[in-house]
């Protein structure tokens, strides 16, 4: 199943793409946004698509086959955007899109432990399996309790961070925590204890009780917030005057970083979206994943 991109119309409007413009999609995924961009900048505008996931790139190439002569693909982390632009000779850069969300195939079809529905998957959670980053299982096996608490509290805003970290420390004395089921069972056991029930733990606010723990681990494994801090100034550097940068975030930690960075750069940018753009009621109904998406757009002076 192809991933459904969020805020499509709003992204295209925000980027203000014209025929001949060159645009970078920093998180290519299944190329939903990219395909629409290539229609907007036709007939001679180009697109640079970046993704660390080799499977995502293969998928994107299939969807963008009809525009392959105007598309440049780069397998890399977008944190290296300056080097990527330099090495590919791509430019001038008239627009940049960063979508910090994860695509449905990455969650459900990559076998890396992102989805609760795939209990037997290993707790990997890396963007790319051949990266040298520690997996989620390694983090759970190696780091101390206080650091685990900090990861769950800071990156996941999990209220039971201390209890869950303590339960993980105790469990790993008995066996390695290596699969999705191992971790989900630990989190559910903590919630049952707190709720004083042996029954199935109810989802809280529409979220599975382990959602925030998994989010926190994914952020820690891929150093996502640090990457955002590093890439935003570099994106402005490669952007041509008059070009636009559009950023989609999906939780408050990301959006806060983007908001504060944009405010700090008002001498060299014009803020297009005074408030973050969110999904319409119709899109929220049709694509529940879009409910947490926030789009911010700026233009380089």
Image (cartoon, grey):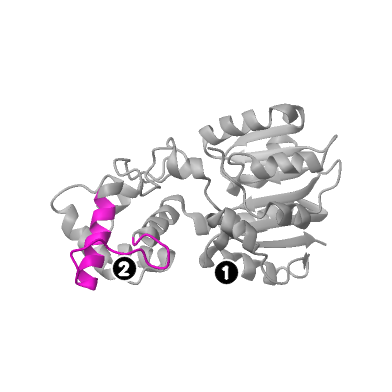
Report if residue 207 lies within the magenta region: yes
**Picture coordinates of residue 133, whole percent (x, y):** 41, 45
Residue at figure coordinates x 52%, y 63% from the top left: 251
**Picture coordinates of residue 245, whole percent (x, y):** 72, 56
Q: Nearer the viewer, residue 178 or 7?
A: 7
Q: Residue 242: which quarter of the image? A: bottom right
Residue at figure coordinates x 43%, y 35% from the top left: 130
Q: Residue 184: which quarter of the image? A: bottom left
Residue 184 in sight from this viewpoint: yes
Residue 236 in sight from this viewpoint: no
Write the start and end of the magenta stretch as one range: 182-209
Q: Report the residue marked by disc 2.
A: 161
Q: Secondary structure at mark 1?
A: helix
**Picture coordinates of residue 193, whole percent (x, y):** 20, 69
How many angstroms separate mark 2 from mark 1 (CA)?
21 Å
Q: Is residue 121 above or below residue 257?
A: above
Residue at figure coordinates x 47%, y 54% from the top left: 223
Q: Residue lying at the far left in this picture: please name it.
A: 174
Quadrant showing the C terminus: bottom right
Task: Judge left or right: residue 8 versus residue 181.
Answer: right
Q: How many marks?
A: 2
| Mark 2 Cα shell of 10 Å, populated few (<14), some (14-19), many (≥20) | many
Q: Nearer the viewer, residue 267 or 6?
A: 6
Q: Are marks 2 and 1 in contact (CB under 8 Å)?
A: no
The numbered disc on residue 256 is 1
Q: Residue 270: which quarter of the image? A: bottom right
């Amino acid at each position: 199943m192809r991933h459904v991109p969020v805020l499509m119309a709003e992204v295209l409007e925000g980027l203000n793409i014209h025929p001949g413009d060159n645009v970078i999609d920093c998180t290519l995924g299944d190329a939903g946004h990219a395909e629409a961009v290539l229609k907007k900048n036709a007939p001679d505008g180009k697109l640079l698509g970046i993704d660390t996931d080799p499977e995502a790139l293969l998928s994107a190439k299939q969807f963008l086959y009809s525009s392959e002569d105007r598309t440049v693909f780069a397998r890399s982390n977008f944190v290296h955007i300056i080097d990527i632009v330099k090495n590919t000779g791509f430019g001038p850069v008239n627009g940049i899109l960063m979508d910090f969300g994860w695509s449905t195939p990455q969650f459900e079809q990559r076998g890396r432990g992102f989805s609760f529905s795939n209990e037997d998957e290993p707790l990997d959670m890396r963007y790319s399996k051949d990266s040298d980053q520690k997996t989620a299982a390694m983090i759970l096996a190696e780091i101390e309790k206080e650091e685990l608490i900090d990861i769950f509290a800071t990156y996941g805003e999990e209220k039971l961070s201390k209890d869950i970290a303590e339960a993980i420390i105790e469990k790993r004395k008995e066996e390695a925590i290596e699969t999705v089921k191992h971790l989900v069972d630990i989190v559910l056991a903590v919630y049952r204890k707190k709720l004083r029930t042996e029954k199935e733990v109810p989802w809280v606010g529409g979220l599975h009780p382990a959602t925030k723990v998994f989010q926190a681990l994914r952020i820690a494994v891929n150093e996502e917030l640090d990457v955002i801090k590093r890439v935003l100034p570099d994106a402005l550097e490669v952007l041509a005057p008059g070009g636009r940068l559009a950023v989609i975030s999906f939780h408050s930690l990301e959006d806060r970083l983007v908001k504060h960075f944009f405010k700090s750069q008002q001498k060299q940018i014009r803020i297009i979206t005074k408030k973050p753009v969110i999904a319409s009621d119709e899109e929220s109904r049709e694509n529940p994943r879009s409910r947490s998406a926030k789009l911010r757009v700026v233009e380089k002076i």
